[in-house]
Amino acid sequence: MLPMKWHVVVALMIGVVALIIYAGENAAISNGKTLKLVHIIFRHGIRTPADTYPNDPYINDDLYPVGWGQITNEGKQQLYEHGKYLRNRYGAFLGDHYTPSEYYVQTTDVDRTKVSAQCINAGLWPPNAAQKWGALDWQPIPSYSEPLNQDDLLLVRRPCPKYHKELQRVINTTEISNRLRASQTLFADLTKHTGKRVKDFEDVQDIFTTLMSEEAFGLKLPPWTAEFYPKRMLNATVFSYVLNAYNNNLNRLKGGVLVKKLIADWTAATSGGKRKASLFIGHDSTIVNLLSALQIWEPQLPGFAINVLFELSHNGTRDEYGVEIFLRNSTNVWDEPHRLTIPGCETFCPLPKLIELTKEVVPDDWDEECKIADAGYIPPTLRGP
């Protein structure tokens, strides 16, 4: 065999280096698609109860060691594992060096969402050699939030009279009135057992979530709950989420706000934006309202740490950008996510088509659209989170 010329060796080495660099910058290449931007949207992790009811045997408990409405130790571990899952799924795309301009985190202004972000980031962003600052295999990652009464993205709690007027109109329709009437026995039974006046589906959801949180924390539920929780209360609880996002008028003023943000981010990414991923941590309603606005919410119980992955990719074969959506609502962190398809689109939904399909639920000017003619109208007091 003839000896290889030195310049050929150099050329081959340069080619290999260039290929490695290219692969690093375009690490998530599959079926001709190159990943460009990821949105990771979570409900907070397993928590202690945030609310109670008059006959709750734990109403005066301090819920040691974490307190009311806080992420449990089990929840912290699960969220950390979620971060490791995300590192496994997106590590090649994100790289191992945390760069603030490439990764953004926003939560609601609530302890449990902020702690959830910290736990996820601990699993997702272990420091590399250059960023390791001590013995801990951890680095601080900043997150941002808006005051609850000004939240206009993840909870959308700023006053919106038109939303509440429309929701009340829906509740007064024959269909919902009949459903409420058929649930009166359940409401009366729960009122008797809890000491709390239960008058609608959201009241049932509140009690259901309290019982679920107490059970997750290892507390023994009172005997009366065996007849009601979870089975007899489940349908009413699931429907409470459906009701709050019942039509496009409601979706436009709730989940449509986050859809608008996603579209803006995707559009920026197609124009050379540097951000690679955004992590948003909200609540059960954050997930339900968003997916309802996209017409892809299948009525179910949104579990703790339920999350949605939005992946914007460029299809080199077709020279177009598109979005794929994945839902993860399993207690097993490593279960494969469930692929979702927006009605009228493919699983890889071309961005222009997605924008066209969602135009009915994306507000042009949310503040203006929230206004009503009755200047004296006072929206009801918001619950939670």
Image (cartoon, rainbow, N blue to C red):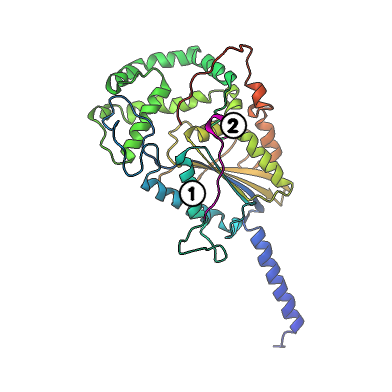
Residue at the outermost right position: 7
Front-lying residue, 382 or 263: 382
Q: Residue at x 40, y 24 (%)?
A: 236
The amino acid pointed to by label 2 is Asp
Q: Which mark is residue 53?
A: none
Q: Residue at x 24, y 31 (%)?
A: 222
At label 1, counting other C-alpha atoms closer than 10 Å, the crowd grade (few under 14, some 14-19, many 20 or more) is many
Residue 232 belongs to the span the image colors magenta: no
Q: Which mark is residue 118?
A: 1
Q: Which mark is residue 152?
A: 2
At label 2, counting other C-alpha atoms closer than 10 Å, the crowd grade (few under 14, some 14-19, many 20 or more) is some
The amino acid pointed to by label 1 is Gln
**What span is in magenta?**
140-153
Q: Is residue 9 above or below residue 218?
A: below
Q: Is residue 278 left or right of residue 196?
A: right
Classify mark 2: helix, strand or loop.
loop
Q: Residue at x 57, y 21 (%)?
A: 163
Residue 147 belongs to the span the image colors magenta: yes
Q: Is residue 71 left or right of residue 316?
A: left
Q: Is residue 320 above or below residue 287?
A: below
Q: Quadrant of residue 183?
A: top left
Classify mark 1: helix, strand or loop.
helix
Residue 104 image offset from top left, x and y in percent: 60, 47
Q: Quadrant of residue 18?
A: bottom right
Q: How many marks?
A: 2
Mark-to-mark CA distance, 1 and 2: 22 Å
Q: Is residue 171 above or below residue 120?
A: above
Q: Earlier in the sequence, mark 1 or mark 2?
A: 1
